Amino acid sequence: MKKLIICLVLTCSVFTLNAKTWSIIGKALENDTTLLEQDATNPNLYKYVGKLTNKSFKLFNGVDYYIPMCGNNDPFVQELSMEKQADESQTGFRVSYVSSNKLYRISLTDGVAPKLIVEKAITYNHIYLIGGPVNTHDPNWLLGDARELEKDPENPFVFYYRGFLKYNTFGEERGAIKFLTSNSSWDPAYHPIGTSNMPLAQASKMRLGGTDTKWEIPADGSRNGYYVIKFNTLDETISVEQFEHANVDYPANIFITGEAMPCGWDNNTPEIMTPTNILEGKYSWTGNVLPGQFKFLKNKGSWGSCYVATLKDQSIVYDQLLPVVYEFEYYNNGGNDYKFLIPDSGRCIINMDLAGMKILVKKETQNSTKNLKMSDEVVITANAGKIVVKCFSAFKKNLAIYAIDGRNIYSNSFVYDSEISLPKGYYIVKVADSKGLNNVKKTCILN
């Protein structure tokens, strides 16, 4: 019985500590009282991120006010111990020099002797993935191979990598990656914490600078495939949000250029084909065309790697599949530079299938451009750990999947069908046309 009572007391003590609330009181923030957010992985850590003024503030845990323990009351880039306030006239914390256009992070570590520190919350415009799986040069890694992550439109600290990673067949550290803050310098870089490499599949904390540790995918190919990686510079965490095993490596986009295209012959600002099902290497582009030549580029800003026709000036026949071949640096390797030829002007849908190495060009008819009743042509099902969306028209749609709490966990565009593997749970699936109209929503349950 005594052991049971002790366990209950300990349990209640831990619960009380974890359930505690800390607030910032004073004129330093926009509101006189601002609740700190408890860290999801460390219940003793409380954080605030946002604007800050050089006014004074104190901390309040729901019972007592806390002030600096020593004479120094400026916690900027130095951790200060706190003590309970004995008198209201006692001085609180104050950051002497702040910038009105910067964000700051206030971190409070709870415990027997609580501590506080204020730091600048650095935001980056760009984050890049670099490493063996994306290396095109043997043996060294090159900055030119760095792949840029997508920045979250709402959270300036969150980035996403959406693309393929494969254990390379050549080069150094063939399965290792790290992240750069610039594509023109190796430093500073983000690494997993610790002194050794860490599996990419394992969600982890990270650090900026220090020992050159890396995340890894295994040499046996079991983690080759399509990844959605969430990268949070504020929490300094990285996690794999989605993984689909595949031994292919389709590009994030394909580009079209030529006299038939609105961009003309331009490899810096070509037309962009978006993936409709990247796991199957399917892409689509819709736009106005003129009579003339065009071809496909693998990389923007380069003529070297192209998807071209098998015949010189291969004339497009609408609604007919035509073969396409990949030429790597054709001008050095003796390949061809055959173009496709659009016979007339109009509005077209160009579909590329890299798995089958075929293209299909359709005239976009009046019926396909008008607003359709999406609910009549979209079928959304959930089964065996997958959400499947099937459509019966040849125009591009946008797909978004949300967790039940409103978090966006998947976004992409597609034409005929899309299939997404997800963990068990409740999801809201939204399909809309390319203009964001004619929304279809459905709640799905994956058991």
Image: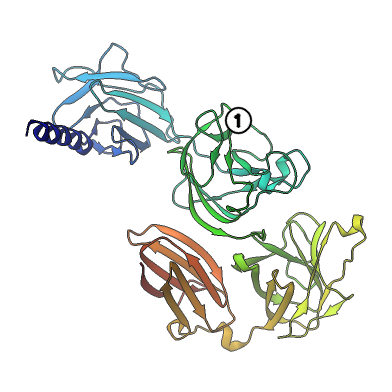
Amino acid of disc 1: Asp
Horizontally, residue 289 falls left or right of residue 224, namely right
Outermost residue, left side: 1
Please tell me which residue lies in front, 264 or 115: 115
Question: Which residue: 35% across, 31% down?
Answer: 106
Q: Residue 236: x and y, percent?
A: 46, 37
Horizontally, residue 385 falls left or right of residue 309, namely left
Q: Residue 56: x and y, percent?
A: 28, 24
- To which residue does mark 1 refer? 212
Question: Which residue: 32% across, 58% down?
Answer: 405
Element type where label 1 sits in the image? loop
147 up-or-down from 349: above or below: above
101 up-or-down from 415: above or below: above
* Quadrant in the rendering for residue 396: bottom right
Q: Residue 335: x and y, percent?
A: 90, 63
Please tell me which residue lies in front, 62 or 214: 214
Colour treatment of the image: rainbow
Mark 1 packing: few (<14 Cα in 10 Å), some, or many (20+)?
some
Q: In the rendered image, which quarter contains the N terminus?
A: top left
Question: Which residue: 60% across, 39% down?
Answer: 178
137 up-or-down from 209: above or below: below
Horizontally, residue 402 falls left or right of residue 349, namely left
Q: In the rendered image, which quarter contains the C terminus?
A: bottom left
Q: Residue 334: x and y, percent?
A: 93, 60
Please tell me which residue lies in front, 220 or 115: 220
363 up-or-down from 88: above or below: below
Q: Is residue 245 visible?
A: yes
Q: Is residue 275 visible?
A: no
